[in-house]
DNA sequence: CTCGTAAATGAGAATGATTCTCAAATTTAA
DNA sequence: TTAAATTTGAGAATCATTCTCATTTACGAG
């Protein structure tokens, strides 16, 4: 694993949780100014392909990357875009029972308001 | 509602269930050769915006459009791309309980093999 | 070491889906 | 029927992502 690959992985694992490739690129540049966007995309894709990180699809938005590969779901804030991990019961099992197979994957993304934005919204309404 | 809008809606409601905009465009052209791709996208987006049809997001693939707006989920075949409606218990309720809000939407897409492709796969292996 | 092959990289071009722009055509209402 | 509003087609623009390819870098055999 090269220094650039290591840097990208470290970023996903620390400061850039649930970040887009573009954001990771920005951060990576601060430490290695010469790094190219293609390298970031290339390595993120490879890491996700190898199951070392997880690629998260968000409808109509750029993909994000997650250090946690274990089963869990995501919610993204409709206002600020922040993303959090959520555990919504055992969706996997529920799908298994419904489809009678185990040979599937699924993408679930919840569009909600994060706590901060929800508060801001209600205060705004009260004004 | 103009003739073109009506045509697009009819296509989604009949021959083009779970189709992409491109596919709907192809079909629309057969009936109205002059119709433009932008018109198809424009009207599909408007119809979805107004809740008359539903836009379905599939990770890494073009969006599809569904005549059924009521709550249900989708599974797409990893081999042939065909999409079917599925009902996987009450995911909505499960998320509600987990997040303690009702102010959200969600996209769920299951990636599986359709019956035909699954059979084809197993026969292929047996050869 | 040191040479050569393989792998990784950067820059920018290419791609694909979708939206935007804007002038021309069409519809609508008064 | 006539001005104003809406819809349309064509193609440009956009955005995320991947691809190309020449260059750099890393690495193993001698």
Image (cartoon, coloured by chain):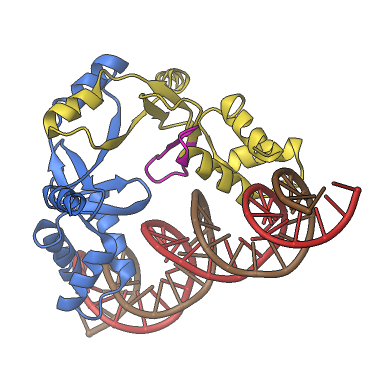
Chain colours: A yellow, B blue, C red, D brown
Q: Nearer the viewer, residue A8 or B19?
A: A8
Looking at the image, residue A88 sits to the left or right of residue A52; the answer is left
Identified at 8% across, 60% down, the residue is B14
Res B100 seen here? no
Residue A21 x/y as whole percent: 56, 42
The residue sitting at 39% across, 46% down in the picture is A60
Instruction: Tell me where residue B96 appears, x and y as whole percent.
Output: 25, 19
Give the side of residue B102 with respect to residue A19, left or right.
left
Which residue is rendered at x = 61% and y = 44% of the image? A40
Say if B32 sits above or below A112 in the image.
below
Q: Main secondary structure of the magenta part?
A: loop
Question: Which of the 4 image quadrants contains residue A91?
Answer: top left
Is B84 displayed left or right of A2 in the figure?
left
| Image: magenta residue range | A49-64
Q: Is residue A26 visible?
A: yes
Residue A62 shown in magenta:
yes
- Which quadrant holds the N terminus of chain A? top right
Residue A72 spot, x, y in % from top left: 36, 24
For residue B43, side relative to residue A38 (left or right): left
Res. C24 image quadrant: bottom left
Q: Where is the C terminus of chain A found, in terms of image quarters?
A: top left
Q: Position of residue B22 (x, y in %)?
A: 28, 65
């Amino acid at each position: 694993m090269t220094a650039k690959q290591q840097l990208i992985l470290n970023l996903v694992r620390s400061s850039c949780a649930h970040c887009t490739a573009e954001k990771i690129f920005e951060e990576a540049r601060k430490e290695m100014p010469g790094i190219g966007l293609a390298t970031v995309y290339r390595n993120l894709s490879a890491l996700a392909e190898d199951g070392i990180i997880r690629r998260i699809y968000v409808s109509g938005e750029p993909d994000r990357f997650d250090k946690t590969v274990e089963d869990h779901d995501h919610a993204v804030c409709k206002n600020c875009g922040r993303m959090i991990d959520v555990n919504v019961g055992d969706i996997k099992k529920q799908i298994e029972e419904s489809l009678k197979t185990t040979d599937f994957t699924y993408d679930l993304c919840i569009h909600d308001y994060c706590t901060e934005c929800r508060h801001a919204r209600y205060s705004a309404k009260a004004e």
